[in-house]
Image (spheres, rainbow, N blue to C red):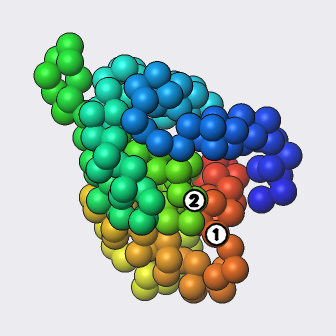
């Protein structure tokens, strides 16, 4: 975690300030700022940031109330966005988990390819039953949260927040 904090302190402070300044999702320009900043600084590869920002803004009442109570369903709500130019639904789970985490870091662990790599590696080198046998953990966000809670419990990391565990997984999932 110290290595992550050292390498990412400016990025983390910028996002802390931005999400702290604009915690609600009821103002489209504020939502767009958060989407663009998170997309760029966390490399989520969202190509249609305006569609994503509009989607969050249009559902702002549901999004804000869900984020306040830590409802896991909001990840799916944010993740599934219809792209206006193609009419296709894009599922941006990594982005959605990061967006939710920045609004409520105690309730939403981050899912991305680094987390996947770390957990896949852990599954190959250990026989921990909490890891299950599924190749992917994003089919249901609630399953991923259960997995991360079991991970925290198994390795006696209960004093750590999901955000702190995210930092560890980010560092070690990239190797």
Residue at figure coordinates x 49%, y 71% from the top left? 148
Residue at figure coordinates x 46%, y 50% from the top left? 100
Of the residues under marks 1 and 2, which one precedes in the sequence? 2
Q: Residues within 10 Å of mark 2 (few under 14, many from 20)?
A: some
Q: Which mark is residue 28?
A: none
Specify whether residue 117 is in view.
no
Q: Secondary structure at mark 1?
A: loop
Task: Identify residue for label 2.
Answer: 105
- Residue 142, horizontal then vertical, whole percent: 34, 68
- The number of callouts visible is 2
Mark 1–mark 2 distance (CA, rounded to whole Å): 8 Å
- Residue 54, horizontal then vertical, whole percent: 32, 27
- Residue 42, horizontal then vertical, whole percent: 58, 36
Looking at the picture, tell me which residue is in the foreground, 43 or 80.
80
1 and 2 marks in contact (CB < 8 Å): yes
Q: Residues within 10 Å of mark 1 (few under 14, many from 20)?
A: some
Specify whether residue 26 is in view.
yes
Looking at the picture, tell me which residue is in the foreground, 75 or 25.
25
Quarter of the view holding residue 20: top right
Residue at figure coordinates x 40%, y 25% from the top left? 28
Residue at figure coordinates x 35%, y 63% from the top left? 72
Looking at the picture, tell me which residue is in the foreground, 23 or 171.
23
Quarter of the view holding residue 155: bottom right
Left of 81 or right of it: where is 67?
A: right
Q: Quadrant of the N terminus?
A: bottom right
Q: Secondary structure at mark 2?
A: loop
Task: Identify residue for label 1.
Answer: 161
- Residue 15, horizontal then vertical, whole percent: 65, 38
Residue sitting farthest toward the top: 85
């Amino acid at each position: 975690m110290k290595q992550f904090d050292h390498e990412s302190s400016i990025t983390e402070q910028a996002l802390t300030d931005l999400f702290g300044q604009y915690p609600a999702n009821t103002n489209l320009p504020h939502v767009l700022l958060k989407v663009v900043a998170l997309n760029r600084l966390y490399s989520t590869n969202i190509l249609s940031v305006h569609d994503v920002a509009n989607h969050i803004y249009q559902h702002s009442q549901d999004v804000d109330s869900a984020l306040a109570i830590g409802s896991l369903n909001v990840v799916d709500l944010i993740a599934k966005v219809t792209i206006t130019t193609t009419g296709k639904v894009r599922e941006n789970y990594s982005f959605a988990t990061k967006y939710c985490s920045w609004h409520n870091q105690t309730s939403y662990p981050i899912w991305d390819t680094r987390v996947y790599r770390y957990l896949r590696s852990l599954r190959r080198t250990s026989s921990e039953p909490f890891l299950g046998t599924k190749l992917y953990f994003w089919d249901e966000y609630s399953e991923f949260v259960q997995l991360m809670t079991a991970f925290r419990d198994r390795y006696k990391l209960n004093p750590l927040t999901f955000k702190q565990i995210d930092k560890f997984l980010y560092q070690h999932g990239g190797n």
